[in-house]
Image (cartoon, rainbow, N blue to C red):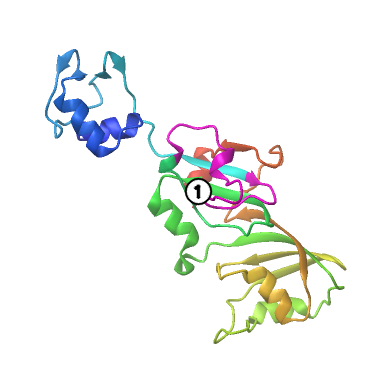
Amino acid sequence: MRLDKYLCESSYFTRALAKKAIKSGAVTCDGVIVKDAGFKVLDKHKICYDGDELNPVGERFLMLNKPADTVCATIDDMHPTVIDLLDIEKPEALHIAGRLDIDTTGLVLITTDGQWSHRITSPKKDCGKTYLVTVADPLDDALIATFEQGVALRNEDGLTKPAQLEIIDSYHAKLTITEGKYHQVKRMFAAVGNKVVALHRHSVGSIELDADLEPGEWRYLTEEEIQSV
């Protein structure tokens, strides 16, 4: 890894600030000042800035139990964001792998790995997202076949991809979709004459929301969870 990138991965430095710090002579490798931003850092090297050792944060993967009235964004002037809930180094490097509406609760995956995130969000990957749905009017068993065949959403051509609906009781269901259309779950139920009054994401792929996480709490993903995507 280039020395300037190493500094960026290990501190608050932007690339410009990292190059300035290196040029100033404040950065050492194994005790020797290095002023070449392109210097290749190896695993065996000890890199210090002003005498303090630096270690890169590396790629990060975590899950958050999103509470209501929190937005899936990095910055928002009106509402708290999911990033605001994280007590973590370099939060600006994180992005959200699949957003939820402000009033939807449950599993949000957050990472620094763009390719990993793409495997979750790309419609071509068919990564299932499972939601627990509460509706205003009683559910009919016939909806299972309707959702499996696909639903015509208002102002869109064609049908949604096949979705798996499991009716829990008259007003509660579990729905798994493989797309991420705007307000899709709410619009699917609206298309069949019902209204979603509460929505909670339970899982993404095989990653399920940790039952021990209270709303607003988070944890890092296990290696098994990371590799499942």
Q: Position of residue 62 (x, y in %)?
A: 53, 41
Q: Give the quadrant of residue 186.
A: bottom right
Query: Relative to 203, is 11 on the left or the right?
Result: left
Task: Say above or below: 102 vs 194.
Answer: above
Q: Image quadrant for the N terminus?
A: top left
Q: Was residue 66 drawn as part of the magenta stretch in this picture?
A: yes
Picture residue at 29% right of the left edge, 37% below the top: 14
Most extreme residue toward the front is: 77
Q: Position of residue 151 (x, y in %)?
A: 65, 81
Most extreme residue toward the left is: 36
Q: Give the quadrant of residue 219.
A: top right
| Structural crowding at the residue carrying mark 1, measured as other residues with C-alpha within 10 Å and reported as few (<14), some (14–19) or many (≥20) | some
Picture residue at 54% right of the left edge, 48% below the top: 109
Res 41 visible? no
Q: Position of residue 15 (x, y in %)?
A: 25, 38
What residue sits right under mark 1 in the picture?
A: 75
For the residue pair 224 and 78, the one nearer the viewer reads as: 78
Res 148 visible? yes
Type of the residue with mark 1: Ile
For the residue pair 182 and 221, the one nearer the viewer reads as: 182
Picture residue at 43% right of the left edge, 58% below the top: 118
Span shown in magenta: 65-91
Q: Position of residue 114 (x, y in %)?
A: 39, 52
Query: Relative to 117, is 140 on the left or the right?
Result: right
Considering the whole magenta stretch, tell me its main secondary structure. loop
Tag 1's secondary structure? loop
Picture residue at 19% right of the left edge, 18% below the top: 28
